[in-house]
Amino acid sequence: MRGDHLKPNQLVFQRGTTPSGRAVLAPMTLQWMDDMRRQIGAALDVIGLGPQEHPWRTAAELLGARLRAYDGQCDASGPIILIIPAPFKRPYTWDLLPCVSVVRHCLRRGASVYLLEWLPPTKAQDGLGLAEYGCQLPSTAMDVIKSETGVSTPILAGHSLGGTLAAIFATLFSERVGGLVLLDAPLAFGVHGGPLARAVKRAPHARYIRYLIGSPVPGSAINALSAAAAPEVFHAQRQADLIASVLDPTAFAIHARVERWSLDELPLPGQLFEDLFEQLYREDNLLGGRLVLGRRRTGIARLKCPVIAIVNPAGGIVPPASVLAGLAAAPDCSATVLTYRGAPGPMLQHLGPLVTPEAHHRLWPKVLKWVDRIWAQS
């Protein structure tokens, strides 16, 4: 029986076994794996392989999130940027090392920077889904930003699924978004969704997966599912980048810290996992205009704000077609598209637009010049 045919009252199999009786990883085992990976990461911090983040303060504590503020010596009239990271990893790939820090790059250009940091969900927060992560929490963060700066239309920036969340918010509240910076962020799934979407099509319903492995869904489980869907990326690309980086001190320093970051998975609230798995990857509801967030319905066609998007053919996770098809389905959106071609150091090229010197030398000056122009026009 496929999981997508299951109803809640049909989930009667004993926890820890499949319907055929084969053993599966128990939730306790996956949580232990998460703990062990975090301990290894802490040991790497001790030997100097942790991130070197810019100082920040907590602007607000939210339900399941924290709003960071990076206070640099910036022009009060400069752009306000709100970063929305991907929801199941720590956000410091945006601020990994001084030489490849998006946060510092933005501050040097006179921007004020905020970051919506997702926190590990508690059992009580297991019901948080796309309605909260793509709507309510960004909205609350923007209320705080307005109270601090007086600005009601910041620029939103997101990488990977963080960019997808930012785009979803922009479809719901176009009047609150000054512009959108998307870095290798999927907008169209289904036939455009690449290896992860193909794997979801073959998988049982997310509700059944939650039942078997526990909910909130352990980060190690998400990591394993991703690696199984795209081993050529999560294994082969990783090893190839190590070989390419080992004789370059800067590339190797970046690679080592991204390896440390890879140990920092966060659990996902079960409802968010199910919404991402089913509404986005399986049903492609964002492209189809059928995305349901609580009592709201939206789709990418409602995207109206200016967008600059970086596509990443080298990444192997988000096909450029996923981004381009989404932008093509938004006729009222003016879009600029840049291309990241790959460089040594990021461990996974999916992260290259954030953490490589090549991206900071060639792409980010163009992105921030676009931000300045959009801000001046607002």
Image (cartoon, helix red, strand yellow):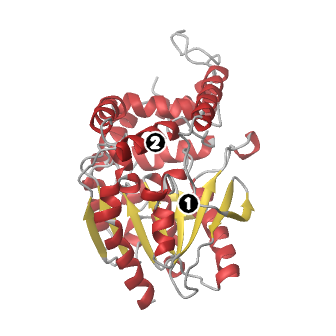
The residue closer to the viewer here, 35 or 50, is 50
Q: Secondary structure at mark 1?
A: helix
> Can see residue 127?
yes
- 368 over 319 or under it: above or below: below
Residue that extends furthest to the top in the rendered view of this protein: 21
Q: Residues within 10 Å of mark 1 (few under 14, many from 20)?
A: many
Query: Which badge, 1 or 2, comes first in the chain's sequence?
Result: 1
**Left/right of residue 368 with respect to residue 81 in the rendered view:** left
Of the numbered discs in the image, which one, if any, rests on residue 210? none
The residue closer to the viewer here, 26 or 17, is 26
Tell me the quarter of the picture where residue 185 sits. bottom left
Of the numbered discs in the image, which one, if any, rests on residue 258? 2
Q: Which residue is mark 1?
A: 134
Q: Residue 152: x percent and y percent?
A: 59, 82
Residue at coordinates 35% horizontally, 45% vertically from top-left? 251
- Name the amino acid, label 2: Val
Label 1, label 2: how far apart the Cα atoms are? 26 Å
